Image: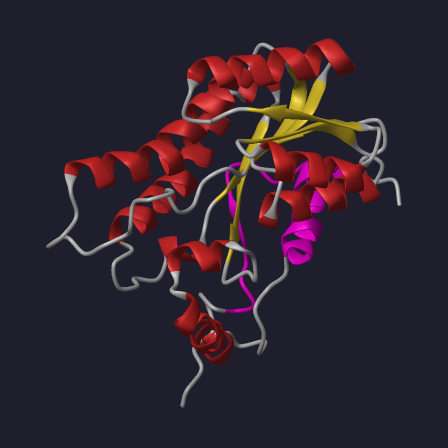
Amino acid sequence: MSKLKNKVTVVTGGNSGIGFGIAEAFKNEGAVGAITGRNEKTLSDALGILGKDFISIQGDVTNISDLENTFKKTFDKFGKIDVLVVNAGGAVDGIEMGTIENATEKSYDSYMDLNLKSAYFTVQKALPYLNDGASVILIGSSAAHRAAPGMAIYAAAKAAIISLAKGLSLDLLSRKIRVNTLSPGSIDTPVFGKIVPEEHLESVKQMWIDITPVGRQGLPSDIGHAAVFLASDDSAFIVGTEILSDGGLTNISLMR
């Protein structure tokens, strides 16, 4: 298990959920590196599993100085960065997603800052430390392809991520840095508890299972395995594209 042996990785939001699933998959393939997150406890818990070859860096991806600190600390520790996973995003704490009738300028800005602006500047601030030939993986979402109630702003941000991978790949061709998007479908993570009331949690999960052709929600490890492929030399000829890891949710219609 050494597809990523000697590669130094940074996974933003690697302290839980999909990000941790990616970091763990990287570790299992021989990678070392850093995970970031805002929550000190979940960072500590994740590091306890990842072990001594990883470091944790507390910070907020919407804060430029925190981003700069992340990459400087990682480079100071490991001397290079080969893989960047721009994973931090999703629901904004304390701000509900909503329809256009009840969205505010603050909610719009908050979701765009976390899910689009932070991704752009995460890549920008990593550039001085990234090796030529590095792989950058932006985490998108199947939401970019399917409208869902109250999710227009989030979905638009994730659709922009898919386009961003293409533009950044073009910008970085001279350095042979590949930028691709990995888009999960419905993944069973603690994020559901943030956006769905507890009394509806199981029914909402079942709804996603019912419309996912493979008949289950994804796991963080499913996304981790796909990320290993994009991080490794196996995907050297894949640039500026999107991989959907969504159990067929986007491209296969279930007739009921």
Q: Residue at the spot x=38%, y=65% of the render?
A: 197
Q: Residue at the spot x=44%, y=35% of the render?
A: 166
Q: Quarter of the image containing the N terminus?
A: top right
Q: Name the image quarter holding residue 23.
A: top right
Q: Residue at the spot x=29%, y=50% of the render?
A: 96
Could you tell whether 106 is left or right of 120 in the image?
A: left
Could you tell whether 121 is left or right of 214 in the image?
A: left
Could you tell whether 72 is left or right of 161 in the image?
A: right
Q: Quarter of the image containing the C terminus?
A: bottom left
Measured from the top left, where is residue 153 in percent x and y? 26, 47
Could you tell whether 90 is left or right of 151 in the image?
A: right
Q: In the rendered view, would you say 7 is above or below 220? A: above
Measured from the top left, where is residue 106 in percent x and y? 20, 36
Q: Which residues are magenta?
A: 220-248
What's the image's color scheme? secondary structure
Q: Is 242 contained in the magenta span?
A: yes
Count of numbered circles on the image: 0
Q: Which residue is most to the bottom?
A: 256
Q: Which residue is most to the right?
A: 1
Q: In the rendered view, would you say 213 is above or below 221? A: below
Q: Which residue is most to the left?
A: 101
Q: In the rendered view, would you say 78 is above or below 146? A: above
Q: Is 222 contained in the magenta span?
A: yes
Measured from the top left, where is residue 101 in percent x and y? 10, 55
Choose between 233 and 3: the one closer to the eye.
3
